[in-house]
Amino acid sequence: MLLTMTSFLGYAYDFEYDGLYYNILSESDCTVRVTYQKLGGSSYISGDIVIPQKVLHTSRTYTVTSIGESAFESCSGLTSVTIPNSVTSIVNGAFYDCTGLKNINIDTENAYYTSVDGVLYNKDTSILLVCPEEKASVTIPNSVTTIEVAAFSDCDKLAAITIPNSVTSIGEYAFYSCTNLTSVKIGNSVTSIGVSSFRNCSRLTSVTFPNSVTSIGVSSFRNCSRLTSVTIPNSVTTIGDDAFSLCSSLKSINMQCEVPIECESSFPENVLKKAVLYVPTGTLSAYKKVDPWRNFLNVKEKNSSGVDAVEADGKL
């Protein structure tokens, strides 16, 4: 029984055609999806590939309508993929750990998806779905409102990103392990920072959230080991557990929230000892009553507007 189960989990395809592997979705409709050769397996396919619109199996013609989960997982030699107009579904994780992937191309007649400079979007480019891991720079169109789950995950050549004002949400694991990312500019319409969205971005040095942000997700900046400063605006009402855990280089945290937000952020002990926590004028006593802020040794009040003083010069 154990051997049978192991075999089933490791190999999940129904048939192979010209080097790609497929599951039959419907015999009556003659539809199939692209699947993996072996779950978590080696790079069984490489180079530039074109997924066919039709495939043959047991003298029957099937239409390729889907690209399944883990379909190309760990195919490190895969450099580009062209997807036909028959595909109506591409599952998250289809291109996970494709470290050599440079471009995802979509047939222009596809009614569900499109690509811009090799990056995968839904048809009206309102959702950014997948950025190939080999991309070093990406310009996000102003039409994008959502950055999907794990969209930029493991894009370790990406050094900087500007999230336009059109974007309202950053999905879970969106920039997970972008280890070369040093600069992030977050547009002023983003309301939520997803779970683990910037986790393991080990070269990121500073983050300033716009006033539109209301929630910072669990572990969203966990292990950003070079992060030195964070500015959190008064609009934020929720900070998830471990949001800044293992951020061992933090020197200043500028809290503009007039009401302290209780959370389990698990700041490293050296940060609690040496970093300066800035809180709005008149809120020091309140912050000293709430975790994790009361654990900081160095807490200072500061004008939350960022203006410390105004001097008159006799002119308007």
Image (cartoon, rainbow, N blue to C red):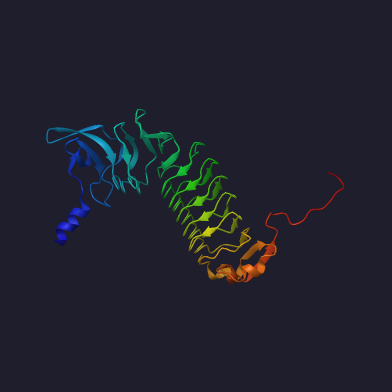
Left or right position of 181 against 100: right
Question: Residue 135: x percent and y percent?
Answer: 44, 42
Question: Residue 271: x percent and y percent?
Answer: 57, 67
**Looking at this view, is 213 or 186 the one in front?**
213
Left or right position of 7 against 102: left
**Looking at this view, is 195 or 40 the one in front?**
195
Left or right position of 21 against 270: left
Q: How many marks?
A: 0
Residue farthest toward the left in the current orientation of the protein: 58
Q: Quadrant of the N terminus?
A: bottom left
Question: Residue 226: x percent and y percent?
Answer: 54, 58
Q: Residue at x 18, y 53 (%)?
A: 8
The answer to whether residue 21 of the structure is visible from this angle is yes
Q: Residue at x 45, y 45 (%)?
A: 147
Left or right position of 198 against 66: right
In the displayed structure, 7 sits above or below 242; it is: above
